[in-house]
Image (tube, rainbow, N blue to C red):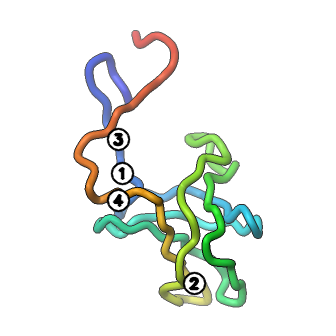
Amino acid sequence: RAGRFDAWVRLITSRNFSIPVTVEDTRDLGVLGGNGEGEIFLQYIPEERSLPLRSPVVTALLDEGFPPGIPVGVLGEPRNLLGGFRSYLVHSGVPLSRFYRVSVMIGGNIP
């Protein structure tokens, strides 16, 4: 949410934030979420699927809030197995937990 003099952002590493994503190399869909400690995970991948490490992870077309194809990171090692689904660590390429300032740029005029 952006205003004339301020903006409110939610970090992708937040526990209460999730977005639909796609693993580009396999076209598998999942949900990306954070653990509140600076890490992000690809979740809800069926346990029988084996995804190649270092595959690009991008936003999916399933959410109107984010355009598809925005790079999020690369697939890391598999983690938890819960209820028939596996999660994978996603490496963002930047140390997200070390940000203390972000810039929000929008197009058009702000009323």
Query: Which of the two marks, 1 or 4, is nearer to us in this view?
Result: 4
Disc 1 element: loop
The residue tagged 2 is 86
Image-quadrant location for residue 7: top left
Residue type at tag 3: Val
Residue 55: % across, % down: 65, 68
Residue 33: x and y in percent read: 46, 64
Would you identify the image quadrant in which residue 22 lies?
A: bottom right
* Mark 2: amino acid: Arg
Q: Are marks 4 and 2 in contact (CB under 8 Å)?
A: no
Corner quadrant of residue 13: bottom left
Residue at x 27%, y 26% (from the top left corner)? 6
Residue under label 1, please give it.
Answer: 11
Q: Residue at x 56, y 41 (%)?
A: 65
**Badge 3 vs badge 1, beta-carbon distance below 8 Å:** yes
How packed mark 4 is, by other alpha carbons closer than 10 Å (few <14, some 14-19, many 20 or more), is few
- Classify 102 as above or below 63: above
Q: Going by the image, does 91 lie left or right of 5?
A: right
Pair 4/2: label in front: 4
Residue at x 51% of width, y 13% of height:
108
Q: Is residue 13 above or below residue 108?
A: below
The residue labelled by disc 3 is 9
Looking at the image, residue 99 sits to the left or right of residue 48; the answer is left
Q: CA distance from mark 3 to mark 2?
A: 28 Å
Q: Nearer the viewer, residue 52 or 106?
A: 52
Question: Cα distance, mark 3 to mark 4?
Answer: 17 Å
Mark 1–mark 2 Cα distance, whole angstroms, equals 23 Å
Query: Which numbered disc flags the more N-terminal residue, 1 or 4?
Result: 1
Q: Which residue lies under the disc numbered 4?
A: 95
